[in-house]
Each structure stands twice: as structure tokens, then as C-alpha cells.
Amino acid sequence: MEKLRLSVAGSACAVGHRDLRSPQSEENRRHRRQHHFPQGRSLSQAEPGNQPGGGTLEEAERRSGGTGRRRNPWAVEPRNRRNQLAAPTEPPGVYLERKGSGRCFLVAGRRRGPGFAVAMLPYTVNFKVSARTLTGALNAHNKAAVDWGWQGLIAYGCHSLVVVIDSNTAQTLQVLEKHKADVVKVKWARENYHHNIGSPYSLRLASADVNGKIIVWDVAAGIAQCEIQEHAKPIQDVQWLWNQDASRDLLLAIHPPNYIVLWNADTGTKLWKKSYADNILSFSFDPFDPSHLTLLTSEGIVFISDFSPSKPPSGPGKKVYISSPHSSPAHSKVAAATGAKKALNKVKILITQEKPRNHMLLLYPREILILDLEVNQTVGVIAIERTGVPFLQVIPCFQRDCLFCLHENGCITLRVRRSYNSIFTTSSEEPDPDPVQELTYDLRSQCDAIRVTKTVRPFSMVCCPVNENAAALIVSDGRVMIWELKSAVCSRNSRNSSSGVSPLYSPVSFCGIPVGVLQNKLPDLSLDNMIGQSAVAGEEHPKSPILQEVHLKFLLTGLLSGLPSPHFAIRMCPPLTTKNIKVYQPLLAVGTSNGSVLVYHLTSGLLHKELSIHSCEVKGIEWTSLTGFLSFATSTPNNMGLVRNELQLVDLPTGRSIAFRGERGNDESPIEMIKVSHLKQYLAVVFKDKPLELWDVRTCTILREMSKNFPAITALEWSPSHNLKSLRKKQLATREAMARQTVVSDTELSVVESSVISLLQEAESKSELSQNISAREHFVFTDNDGQVYHLTVEGNSVKDSARIPPDGSMGSITCIAWKGDTLVLGDMDGNLNFWDLKGRVSRGIPTHRSWVRKIRFAPGKGNQKLIAMYNDGAEVWDTKEVQMVSSLRSGRNVTFRILDVDWCTSDKVILASDDGCIRVLEMSMKSTCFRMDEQELTEPVWCPYLLVPRASLALKAFLLHQPWNGRYSLDVSHIDYPENEEIKNLLQEQLNSLSNDIKKLLLDPEFTLLQRCLLVSRLYGDESELHFWTVAAHYLHSLSQERAASTTAARAPAPRDRVNNPLDICYDILCENAYFQKFQLERVNLQEVKRSTYDHTRKCTDQLLLLGQTDRAVQLLLETSAENQHYYCDSLKACLVTTVTSSGPSQSTIKLVATNMIANGKLAEGVQLLCLIDKAADACRYLQTYGEWNRAAWLAKVRLNSEECADVLKRWVDHLCSPQVNQKSKALLVLLSLGCFSSVAETLHSMRYFDRAALFVEACLKYGAIEKLIAAIYADYARSLKNLGFKQGAVLFASKAGAAGRDLLNELESPKQELTAQ
């Protein structure tokens, strides 16, 4: 950040209206002392006789009192020596000194020899402008390129860029630029692993483009870690693998037309590649079983059941075809190939639903089909009424059975699965034997639609993966709209009972633990804290006063607008000087094709103001001050080539705009350009076929309209030289003389003189308008022949001063730039002509780049850099050395075409391009991404991923172990943290950025450790911890309830309560057995109602037999018609099922038959027979032997008692922990569901998850659920905290570890003793 320090130290030079944007070399300062104003000199011999007024530029300026011979303006007059160093804008004695530090100081006081007193007045001026990209409308290829990561950030593609925004504050945090083609997919890496120093919280993102390139980014640093290329065709889909504990670098991608390739995203190496017969459009993993992969191809759906990271899938997969959609069950079966092609044209996307298991969603424009993959049939249809708006996208939720749907009008709807408990409740525990059910999703909330036009339409929607309570809509015009779900408690009598929609209730628990009505909770924290679970059919909601009915609504909490579609006209505000340092803001005005002007603040990159000024495309903008600008627009020409010209003067603070030319502007020649003079006094308006107009900017009056024979102007530029200083000195001398005449006595002279002088200096700092000074200024222009004219403007008088004949080597001049003693001209043929006015030499350089459209000098005294814009790019030149500094060419370096250029600061340029973006770049014009932690943000952002690994983990420990020192605090300054102060400040900034609601929870003494762990895992977006603590909190709390029930000898309510407040079914196998059984029965009921073919009936029968529902199974078996080839087998099976419970010999026979069938490859049939004779435990063992681990776990949950079930699941745990499977994190969840808390702590410790192990032990001790291993876990955790530099935490846990932590405790406390001894 460029900072200034104003002080009186040393011999400072005078401070005038100095430009601080570039360092000033000694050579420049010497040059400035000698030639304060540029000396106009002819570059070729002029013809005095033929020129009115005659002579050279130098002579012309001398005649008009210009810059002929001057005294050195830096010379000091003796009588005013004391105040000569004072800056006009500051009180006497305020001086300038340059420092590299981060603050500015005004130093008040007068210089009185070597020793003097100063008063420091610190204030911070923030004018740092970092390289950045302002993005605009999206490309059609970007439609599906959006993802919301667990890290809380949203990434989306904008042409070839990847934009990263914060979902809470809707601020752009990063723009990644390396792709050479449009981005088609972006995917954040998953966060489902244990984080420590070796595996820190990091922002990893994969993006893929239409040329087949995949880039893996380190988003925080803005660098590409890895680039992957297989083919030069668009990537269809890409996904990170999440199931392996060992590797988190695996990336699966679809490379057209029909390849799936597994990549190591860390090294860019290809692990394997597999081709399929049909073109693959997209894919989806089964969230419950990562070995199941589904591909949507051009011909149908392919199911792969043996997906593994270690080797490609073996066979071609199981292919099924989709029939055309229809809401009646008879037409929604998985049909044969006939008509499948036609139907697939309508399928938008396929998604494996998050819950319940083995369901899939198929999205059509007017309906969503819910397929049950166990029986391959449609079990539910979400149809849109005839007048409804078609679907674009659907996202299923994990935490509750809900769907976020996006419609073609940009409306997002939330549909929640209907609960039938209020309709089909029975007093008995047995479920209704024949419920008539539908899988119905009721519309519960919807947000406002957007105005859809040809160019503005919704592109895509993403849902927050952590809390599932917010959705972001990406619109084609570059807008990002973040809609958040809010819940409101409503009175029961206000609900319309005739709607047929069952009420939604708020959950009993918050962050995993049931809480009372008066306890602190944050219902909008996440979806599962907003609405309770839908009760299973046949279950009654517990009649409890805690249950409150809630309504949901969407609230727009974030809106990020992009730039409108090009064409753009850009202009940076006047540069920073010592005069405006207190009020300066780096503002960029962007004129758009729809007539509005957008003003951006370049420190933050945010839109400062949007002003609708014109009715047609803005052609140019010129600033008249830091707070005002002129903009002009021209309408489309009529038959005679005449247009309506609009020239508006805008005041930025108020937004008021006035027609600068009054009534003028209708039916006249179009304005070609406007140019404001150096002192912002005069305005030159150049027309296409009409003479020049000169206006006074301050009074909005016309000074001169040139005669009709005035030459046509091709380029015009004002001179930086003027006579304002000499005028001011004359005025000051006059006023001093007047002041002397009013003095009464000589004794009072010195007092009056000093006060008058200080008053006059204050007056001097005011605007020229208030002083009515009209300084003389000059401008040059060229005509069609290339002749250069020099004119002088002073007040109302305009004088023609000199003419210089055309240079033969130049074509038609298109633009001029003038700074100091250098004048540069550009022509139609791409030539640049550099005139050195002081040395009277010119030098022509052919750039061979065609038409020079614009040239502009960089701000900053002595900075002679110049940017030139061509049809095919831009170049930066050093006019002092007359050599090119950098070049950018469309089609070679970049894919975009440049529309306009300007300077942002002395070393940064601004490029507006036809991809709808505006880039602020370094002078090299190379696109670079910035570091996120270096960016200036207007609002603080909670993102611990931006901290260094040690700091982010230390912050986590600080939040988890509240209270520190016996009191709750979110102030890091009290903590003994040895890192440098800067890191401590960053930690405090992160804590301060938390919402007040979150802070209130963290500081609540009743907020338990388990709830704290769950909340912090949500704040960090830590997927692995969120699932672990959800399951842990549920089962630890269940344990405490069971114990409480057993001590009061009231055992009956405990299991009932566990079923009333069970673990949500999204956790599948981890749920309580009773709840899991009820859910499976409900599911088979639905399958039975929806069956339409014999195949469906047979699969339903198989499920009923496994679930032990023999009577209903027999009914279905007897339904088989006599014509069916299976009629005889089914009849015999029905007989077998009804008689199976007889004598022992029959059971042994059946067991023998079952084992033979299993040995001969008929596993499913053998398992079914074993279940008939209540040998489900043996059946599970056989399933496990043959590798069907998930099926065995399912069967154990629905058929076995708790002890037998636990045995089966423990064997599964051993399998999951084996090296070849390596899914220990899943094994931990299974152990939690079994209540094996000691084993969980042991496993965590062996996996070196010391932090999680210590917290888990701490939580278990509160519930009395663990006795051993405590000391070792605490000691290891204390060591890990010590490594993080968190001494207080280390001391706390080392002391808890007892003997095991004594050595560490001594080691930690010894430095303190040494300090006290000293």
C-alpha cells in the first residue's frame, strides 16, 4: 500500500498540487526545477509569413504571456521564506515526507531552526489499488460452471475466468485467470478428512474448460497447482472422490465422447481410463455407497457397481432405458429401447438422491420422477400444473427430505416430503397393513422470480452443502443472488387445515441436544435445526408443548451485480495529490451501452454508484473533479446522418445530472469526443461534421462556437501548462498590499501580516471558481491533413497561436497525448510520433499494429509511461527512452479484444474487453491472480481457510475449549499465543467477523461441549467432523436418557423417546434399529402400491420375505397368473412360506438347501430361505463372506436383535478398518451407533486424531461413558496444541493427563519460571 508521512524533518521541497502516484527520481526533480512549464518549440521550421500570429509554439506562448522566459518557480523570496514550504491545502507548517510504512501523519508546527516541537496527527489513507478483474455477463458455456463448497465460498465460471465469492457478504474474493477457453465446470474439493498441520484447511478448486483442460487451483494464493489435458474437447463432468481416507487428490472426469478418466489432481498423472459404448453426458455417485456410479449417456442410464480408485470398472455396466415420462405408474417403468431416444432428449439431468438410499431423481421440464432403484420403478412424481413454470434444476437435501427446485423464471422453490402421520395414525404400535401412500413433496416456500429476457435468464442454482438453508442463483447477466431460508413460528390456529399440507414442526433438539424453549438456540443455523423430521407413517408426533409449528420463507441476503454487456467507455478519476489526499477515492466511471454510468471503487472492487443518465450508448466520460464528471451519448443516426447528442454534467455525491449544453443537442452532427482542460476550467466538444465548441465547465456557458470554415478535427489534447501560479501570486500580492493599507499602527503590523497570510493561504486552497481566476490554458489539435494547430484560451478569449505543417511520414492523425515536454501523436497506420518540445526533435516509430485508437499518459510527476490502444490490443511505452515496455495482442496473448484503456495508478493500467470484463493489471499487462489475504474488503469475511495452517487450527482450538481461564471470551489478546502480533490480529479479525447470534451461542455457559463441537464444525465447513459429532451427540445423549430412565425404574419411555427423536434416516445404517425397520416397511409398502409388472411384484415379495412380512408376501405370490411361466414356482413358494414354521427336520432341510444354493452362486435365494427359518444371523455371515457388506448390515438392522446385530456390524467395522478398504472414518460412525465409545476413542487415538479424541473423551466423561485411555489421549493432544503454539491449551490438557503429561507440563512451565527468575 502506498502510504505517506507528512513531517518537517529534513529539507523538504515545496508541496503543491503534487501527484503522488509514482516515485520521483532526482533527475526528474532537477528537470522540474529548470523547466517548470514545458517550453513549446517547433519540430520543423514553421512558415511565419503564412501563419496568423506567426512563429513557433514557444513564440506564441511568449506573446500571450505564456512560458517564454520565467524565473525558477522553486526559488524562495526572502520575505516569505518561512511559509514557502507550506502546502497550500494544509495549515502553515505541514510538510511532506515519504515513508514506506502503513500510516500517514500530518505534522503541525512551524519550522524554527534545528530544534522544534511537533504534534503528530495520525490518520490512515487507504488508496491501495490491487490488480483485479471486474466481471460481467456470462457465456452460454458457463451455464453449469458453478459450485458452493464446504468452505462457504461460491465459485462460478465467467467466460474463461473463475470467480470466487463469499456467500455471507456477497463480496468477490478472487478471480482466477489461466484458462484460454470458456470454463464449463468448477468443483470445490471436499472437506471430509481430518485436518491437522499436515492436512490443513485449504481452498482447492478444480475448473475445466471447453478445450478439455482441467486446472486445480490453490485459490487463497491464486496459483494453479496442476494442469491436466487429455483431449481438446469440452469436459462434460468432473467430481472429486471423497470415500478414501488415504487420498484426497483423486479427480474423476468425463472426457468426450465416451471416456471416464481418474486423475491424481496433485501430480496430474492419469491413474486409469475407461471407455463406454455411448456418449457420456454426466455422472453421479451413490452417496451411500461410493462403489456405485451412474452414468447418463445419450442412449440411457448405465449403472456401475464396482467403481474403485485402484482399477477401472471391469464390465460395460448395466444399461437401462427410460420410457417417456407420464404421471401414471403404468407408464413410468424402466422400459425397453423403443422410444427411449425421444424421451432422453427431454431428460435434463440425473441425480442420485441423497436420501433415502437407492433412490434417483430424473428431471424433465414439467416433472421430476423419483425412481426406486431396488425395484426399478417410479415411486413418486412431482408434476407442475399446466400453468406452472418448467423446471431447470433440482437439488436434493441431505439433512431433511426436501428438494430445492429452480424454474425457468429464476424462481427457487423448496418442496418438503409430506408426512402422513396426521392422516394415518393408529393407536397400536403395528403399522397399518394396507396404507394407500404417495411419495408427495409439498411446495413450502418460493422466492421471487427474475425478469427473463432474451439476454437475461437463470443459468444455475447451488445449495449450501453445510447448512442446506441457502441457495445461490447465477443469472446470465452476471448477477449472483443468494436466497436464505428463514423460519417463523406461527400459531396453530392460523394454519389453513383444508390445504391438505401437513404442518412442519421445529425440531426438539438444537445442535444435536434437546433444548428447552427458553434456552439459547439459533433456529436458522441449518435446515435440520429449522424443521423436524417427517414422522414415519403409523407414528404419532409426540404431543409436546416444545413442538412449534413453523413456516419457511426465502429472504434475499446477498446480491452481486456484474458489469452489463459491452460496449464500455471507461475513465479513471483524477489522480491522487497532496491536495486531495484526505478525500481521495480511486473511482472508475464505466459508461455502458444502455446509457447508464457505473462508478466502481477500485480498492474494494465494489459498485459505488449506478447512475441512469442517458437514453443511448455512452461514448465517452471526462471527470471535472473528484466528485463530478461529464459524459456524452449519441443516438443512432437518422436518414440525414443527424443524431440526438446528450452531454450531461453529473454530481456524484447527490447523483444530480444536468444537461450541460442546455437545449442544444437535437438533430445535429454526432459528438466525436469531449476533452476537459488540465485545470478542469474549459471543455472542448468535437463534432463529426460541425465546428468545435468551447465551454466554461464552471459556469456551464459556451465560450466560443467556431466558424463554419474551422478545420475538421481528427485529434485534440489540452496542454498541461498554464499560468495559474503566476496569477495567484499577483492576486496574493494585491491582497497583501490591501491588508497593509488597513493596518492602524506599525506595532501591530507583524501580527496582522501573519494572520492575513494564513487566511490567504486557506483561501488559495479553495477552488478556482470561488476566486474567479480564469487561468490561461492551451490545446492542440490536428486536421484531416495532419496539420497541428495550437490555440490559447483565457476567460472568454480564444487565440490562434501557431500552426505546424504535417509530418510526411505520418498518416491521418487519430489521437494526441501531451505531458511535460513530450507530445505524442498516433495515426491510422499504427505510427507513433514522439515530439520532444524542449529538444526540438521528433521521432517516428512504426508499430505495424494498424489504427492507433487511443493514447494516454500515466499519472505521476516525471512518469513518462504511455499506453497506446490498437484494434488488436495495447502497448505500454516509455516516452523518455522511446521504447516499448509491454505489449498485449488479441488472439496471441489473450482471447479477448480490447475496447478501451486508461491508467488506474502510475503503474497499473485498466483494460475494458469484449468478454464483458474490466481488468486492472500491472504495467506488464500480464494477467495475474492476487493473494486473497492481501485484498482490501469493505466487510470482514469469516474464512479460517485464509489463515496459515497453524493459526486456523489454533483458532479452532480456542473456539472449542471455551471457557479459557474460567471465563467465556472471544478476545484473543488474553491468550498466551507466541506467534507475531500480526497473526494474533488476524485471528481477532476472524472472531470479530462472526455474527452476533453465533457469538452469543459461543459465550453461552449452557452451550455444551458437544453442541460447541457441532457448531464449530459447521463454521469451518468440516464435513468429516460434522457427521462425526452429529452421530456422537445423538448416541451419547440417548445413553444418558436410557440411564436416567433405568435409575427411575421407568424403562418404557426410553426406547419410545429414541424413536420419537431418532437419528435422521439420512444416516441410513447408523439409525436406531426400530426406526430403520419402520422406514423399510414404509418403503416396501410404497413399492407394493406402485408395482405395475410381474418383475416389480417379485422384487416386492423378496423384500417382504427378508423383512419377515410373510403374510403379505404370500398374498403377492398367489397373485401370479396361471399364464405366467413362474406360476408353479410361486405357488410352491407360497406353500413353503406358510408351512415353514413347523418341525425341526424341515428347518434343517431348508438350511441345507440354502447353503447349497449359496455355494452354487444363488446367494440372494439362499439368504431368503435362511431368513424364512429365522437364521438371519447365518444369512448375514454368508453375505459378508461373499463381500456383500452393505446388504449384510441392512439385513442385520431389520431382522436381528441388538446383540446379534452388533456382532454383524462389528465384523463390518473390522472390514472397513482393513488396509485394502481404508474407510476408518465410516467405521467410527458405525462404532458410535453401537455405543462402543471406548473403541471409538481408541480408534481415534490410533489414527492420530488427537484433537477429536480428546474432545470426544471430554464429552464422554460428562456422560460417564468411558474409563480408559484418557491420560494418553490428553497428553498427546497437549503436545499437538504445543506444536500449534497454543501454550495455555497445552498446559490445560497436560494437567488433565496426570502422570502422562507431567513431563510436558514441566517443559511448558519452565520458560515461565526462568522469566520470573530473571
Image (spheres, grey):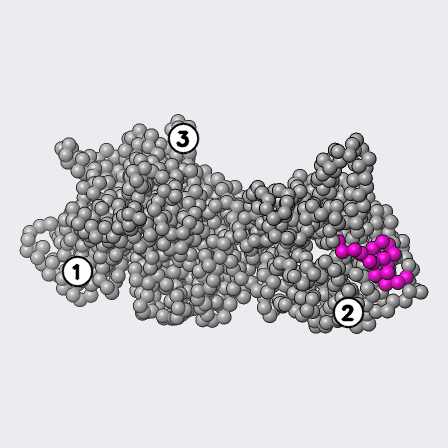
Please state which of residues 386 and 786 is positioned toward the viewer in this rendering.
786
Residue that badge 3 annotates: 490
The quarter of the picture where residue 1079 lies is top left
Residue at the spot of label 2 = 842
**Can residue 1229 be seen by looking at this rendering?**
no
Label 2's element?
A: strand
Residue in view at x 90 percent, y 61 percent: 54
Give the Cα distance between marks 3 and 1.
53 Å
Q: Identify the amino acid type marked 2.
A: Ser
Residue 814 marker = none
At 75% from the left and 49% from the top, the residue drawn is 77
Check the image and report above or below for 389 versus 72: above
Q: Amino acid at mark 3?
A: Cys
Q: SS for tag 3?
A: loop
Q: Position of residue 699 (x, y in %)?
A: 79, 42
Extreme residue in the top direction: 493
Which amino acid does the dot numbered 1 rest on? Tyr
1286 to the left or right of 1163: right
* Residue 159 in the figure: left or right of residue 235: right
Q: Is residue 564 left or right of residue 542?
A: right
